Amino acid sequence: MAASSKKEETDLFDLLKDLAKNWKIMIPCLIVSGIIGVFVALWIRPIYQVDALLQIESKNNKSMGMTGGLGNLFATTSPAETEIELIKSRQIIGEAVEKMRLQYVATPINKLDRLLHHEGRMELNNFDFPWETLPKEEKIKPWIAEVTDSLTYDLYDHHNKKILSGQIGQTYRVPYANDTLIFSVLNMKATAGQRFELGKMERLDAIDKFKGAFDVKEKGKKTGILEFSYQDIYPDRATKILNEIATSYLRQNVEQRNAEAQKTLEFLEKQLPDIKAQMDSSLLKFNTYRNKVGSVDIGAETQIILEKRNKLQQSLLDLQQRKQSAIRLFQPEHPTIKTLEDQENNIKRELASNYAATKKLPNTQQEVLKLTNEVEMSKHLYTTMLNNIQQLKLVSAGEVGSVRIIDFAEEVSRPFKPKKGMVVFISLFLGLIFGAVIISIKSKLNSGVRDANLIERETGFSVYAKVPKGNPNGTKGTRPLAVVEPDDVAVESLRALRSSLEFSMDEGVHTIIGVSGLIPGVGKSFISVNLAALFAGLGKKVLLIDADLRKGRLHKEFGIKRGKGLSQILLHTATLEDVISSTEVNNLDVIQCGNVPSNPSELLGSKHYSTLIENLKNQYDLIIVDTPPIMLVTDAAQACRVASQIVMVIEYNRHSIEAIKDGMKQLLKGNEEAHASFVINKYEHGHNDGYGYKYGKY
């Protein structure tokens, strides 16, 4: 686990290092993405969000006040999820869309005004025309309204033909295309010259667009509190729209409850005469029987049985009403229904027991008890129905609903979005990702070799040093970096190269080291100059020859004025005394390239060049020959044919292994006995290289 975490840290470190290395790619990406982010943040129209709160009465709550026990009977509310879907229905939203004229669209079209947030505003009240009569290709073309001053405007059709000049609040009926165009502007806040694209959406399209900006959700769990929210570019319009939705839902809720109450009232009023006739009939039967048998003395026991039966029957009637109300709200298997059914069965068993006790009484008392019970029950039913009718009339007249508005929407001053800081941050992040992708693609397309082991395995030659980027100034004045900054990390690596070359040299033999590179710019001359300075520091007498007769520049490294050099010696126009220059580095002399000859390759391949080197070997302990790039000209192979050591300088992550192998092959032509090696210049240490970057300070 620790190893995995360390690897992730290493990968992240290497990624950040790659990004820093490719700052020339990253900085433009970040600048461009930042500019785009600022532009987008300014371009997006501010969106304002307003909200309102409504309370939905719970279905299990009993209605308070005069409605009494009818609360459950006429409660029409449902769970919050159901209410939310009802609020989002076309019945509620469609009414608000039509009332607020949201199917009409007037969009400002000036891009500079939008960027500076100086856009005007126009709201249409009417824009009606039989659009179906227009060809399909003309329906999609917008009409244009151009503001002439704060109160007037000009209307142009989709052919840019002026139709009318109008004022705010006026409705115009204009003949157009064998029909009538009805147009009016409800509100306008704009400056002269501002233009608007006009259009009309289908009702369903307007409703769908509204739903995209509208949301309703329950605040908390099972609280019965619904939160409405709506987003619009105009905060005052958003407030009006949301309040319209809330009041529209409240109004329809009241109308629905009153409609149900009215239907129930009509039903009860139709049943009332029958109940009254039933009561009169039971009372007539009772009086007739009493006249027939005379006065009947009812004992205390009979009276108790009668009172108990009346109470049980009334309780049964009330319980059955509650059960009917519950059935409208719950499924038959719901615990509430089951409980009411159990209570109903218990009362029926008590009634059966009461009837059994009645059988023990005399026949006359049984009949009186029966008739008295019928009279009492019919009176109770009639009275209850009258009370219900009165309560329903109060419900209908009082416009009682199951919804109340807690908080109306209020206009806000701060936009809900866009979050400008977040937009810019996301844009910069995307710019960072985009830059990283470019760098990654560039890295993948670059087939350069990074692994020294791969080079050694594929070529058979050793990599003697991996030289990181040293002091960016290279040399200071006329002295090499190895003299000026001896503790630089690049110099430390060059010391390793010097040691490796020393180990491969024959003791007591004057050595000639040929230094070349694959292509220009790999740091070949940097290696030659500093390697020569390091050998001179050991007390050896060193000669550095610039054999790049075409574009030699070693004289610049030591502040030597360009003059006669190697080319003049080979052309027999100068002597050694004329071309050998001393430097500020002790024990180090330089022969510069000289003037550019017409045949540099032939000069380096001549016998005179070989003789010259042989003569110089007797004067110096070590000769370093700086040659041209091998992949461009054959001069390097000609110059290195006299060398006992050949060092090829390659740049880290720049060359393919095939190019490296081919370059070394070309360099060894005519001198296969030379001891060859590689130096990787501009090497980039990975996170796992440990001390690579800090070694110089150590």
Image: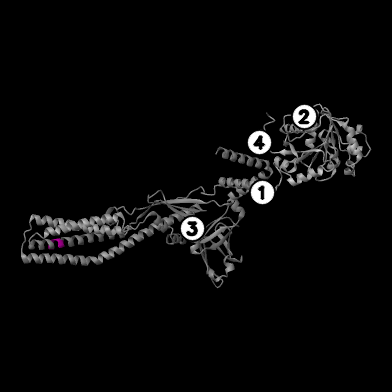
Q: Earlier in the sequence, mark 4 or mark 3?
A: 3
Task: Measure the alpha-carbon separation of dots 1 and 2.
Answer: 40 Å
Give the vertical position of 657 relative to 619 (above or below).
below
Query: Which one is in front in this view, the residue at disc 2 or the one at disc 4?
Result: 4
Q: Name the spot of residue 89 as percent of width and height, x first.
A: 43, 60
Q: Residues within 10 Å of mark 4 (few under 14, many from 20)?
A: few
Q: Which residue: 93% across, 34% down?
A: 575
Q: Which residue: 36% across, 56% down?
A: 78
Are dots 1 and 2 in contact, CB under 8 Å? no
Q: Which residue: 29% across, 54% down?
A: 336
- Any part of residue 467 in sight: yes
Please give the label number shown on residue 689. Answer: 4
Q: Earlier in the sequence, mark 1 or mark 4?
A: 1
Is 577 on the left-hand or right-hand side of 106?
right
- Give the amino acid at mark 2: Val
Q: Residues within 10 Å of mark 3 (few under 14, many from 20)?
A: many
Residue annotated with mark 2:
483
* Residue reaching furthest to the bottom: 178
Magenta segment boundaries in residue numbering: 371-375
Give whichever of 470, 179 is nearer the camera.
Answer: 470
